[in-house]
Image (cartoon, coloured by chain):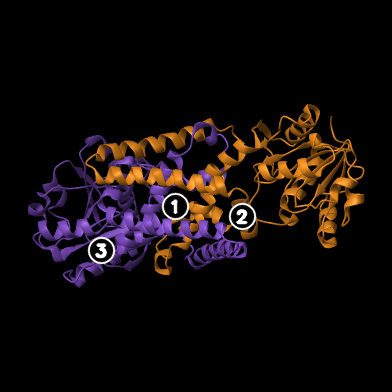
Chain colours: A orange, B purple
Amino acid sequence: MRPKCISILGVGLLGGSIGLAVRSQLPGCRVIGYGHRRSTLDEAIAMGALDEGYDQLLPAVRDADLVILCTPVGLELAKHLNPKAVVTDVGSTKRSIVQAAEELLHNPEQFVAGHPMAGSEKRGVQFARADLYDGALCIVTPTPQTSPDALETVEGFWETLGMRTCRLSPAEHDRRLADVSHLPHALAAALVAMQDKDSFALSGKGFLDMTRIAGGDGALWRDILLDNQDNVRRSIQRLQKQLDHMVALMDSNHHEALREWLDQVGARRQRIIDAKPKG
Amino acid sequence: MRPKCISILGVGLLGGSIGLAVRSQLPGCRVIGYGHRRSTLDEAIAMGALDEGYDQLLPAVRDADLVILCTPVGLELAKHLNPKAVVTDVGSTKRSIVQAAEELLHNPEQFVAGHPMAGSEKRGVQFARADLYDGALCIVTPTPQTSPDALETVEGFWETLGMRTCRLSPAEHDRRLADVSHLPHALAAALVAMQDKDSFALSGKGFLDMTRIAGGDGALWRDILLDNQDNVRRSIQRLQKQLDHMVALMDSNHHEALREWLDQVGARRQRIIDAKPKG
């Protein structure tokens, strides 16, 4: 089902970019936004990301057949939803929101959690772009309870915006994202934090590339790390094992094995790059 | 003293780029190269990086007043050098080469170790560029034995090629570079090594940025890590402390402190970027 009216709850970089992309890819679809600040809603309307904007939930969601959570929303959402509405989200962790939806929504089978892997260190609707999602991957995390029609609606929606989609369980999503995203973020932060001022002056492009993701929003990353802390801890331990292995290779007389390990890692990384669809 | 004849031992990306830059910035200076492979020397001559190229040390160094080591060179170098020649190098670690020079050279006070912080994941003279060094930082590591004139010659040389220079002791260089370069490299490698294939498919731009430096040359990085392994070990321990601190903040009820830590790290990184001279 193609949505005729979508509601975007939270109109920042992610929500605003959804609005712009829908206006471009789904002409005729009504786009409603919800947010706390009137000025943000007005800006989103002025830039063509929304048709209408409300600071109350009821008018923002009652007509929507697809509701997209781009900000934490309280309990009251449930009572305002159209019972047939499909609901999705854009958060970076999935177990907790799936659990909350199952507890709070009247029709949890209509909820399909999603993680469009697009974004930027920049925040705010002023940085929204119609092509933010184009070519990137959206992970959806259905459960055995999820309605197949709702799943198809959400996957079809992101594909209309140019995304590739894949399905994982909420638990697998959170485990793998700890490895490829949350741990790297924590590491980048720790790498900056451990430096003294004089060492910074010696850092080159490699260091800045490596710590780029440490420039993100502290409150957002705190929430991600806390929400996924069991997996992040395990990821830290697995990284530590690799470092221990490397130190053991330095210790031993297996210096050829150290070179092989480094070369294999480089070749593995190159294979990832080669395997990526060109976005 | 401006060199009238320089000898570049090892004509790859670094040595070839020195040749191109000298030909552009020091017209009239004779540029001699040394390498094992005739074809590489011929390529370097054809692209204008060298005036002459030899696969024997004697003709490559006997006339040079500045000799630049861009490859490991054996004992026999000492006996071919002009006694007044100033010698420098471009290696990523400094304690071991300074010690070797003191033991092997007849005039160790003429040796000034250097680390021009420029390069690329690419290897080979075909990637050499006249502007590789322009705007980047060159660390020189004199000792109390170093001749002030030799130090001035080496600093002046790199500055002629557009570099900024700074002085550190060999020990301080190796300690700080472990923090800002060698540990980040080891971490990038460990981060790639710990992933399974399915997680790779979920990695985004942040992961690829963060692991870019893991794409380097395994043999080169093995040598760096081994040569600086005491410092690299200590850097790993200091990073581990930061991760422990972060985990403790997740554990405790100090979630506001976790946000503050993340925000401070982001702000610190931004200050590094703001403080960098525009290259």
Is the residue under label 2 in contact with that under label 3 (CB below 8 Å)? no
Going 42% across and 56% down the picture, which residue do you hit? B240
Depth check, mark 2 against mark 1: the one in front is 2
Going 64% across and 59% down the picture, which residue do you hit? A219
Q: Amino acid at mark 3?
A: Pro
Residue B206: x %, y % from top left: 55, 47
Depth check, mark 3 against mark 2: the one in front is 2
Q: Could you tell whether A132 is left or right of B228 in the image?
A: right
Label 3 to label 2: alpha-carbon separation: 38 Å
Label 2 to label 1: alpha-carbon separation: 23 Å
Q: Could you tell whether A120 is left or right of B110 in the image?
A: right
Q: How many marks?
A: 3
Label 1 to label 3: alpha-carbon separation: 22 Å
Is the residue under label 1 in contact with that under label 2 (CB below 8 Å)? no
Which residue does the numbered mark 2 point to in the structure image?
A: A221
Labels 2 and 1: the sequence-earlier one: 1
Residue B62: x %, y % from top left: 12, 53
Going 14% across and 55% down the picture, which residue do you hit? B63
Residue B95 placement: quadrant = bottom left
The dot on residue B217 is none
> Is disc 2 placed on a helix, strand or loop?
helix
Q: Nearer the viewer, residue A90 or A24?
A: A90
Q: Nearer the viewer, residue A231 or A200?
A: A231
Which residue does the numbered mark 3 point to in the structure image?
A: B170
Which residue does the numbered mark 1 point to in the structure image?
A: A206
- Same chain letter for marks 1 and 3: no
Q: Amino acid at mark 1?
A: Gly
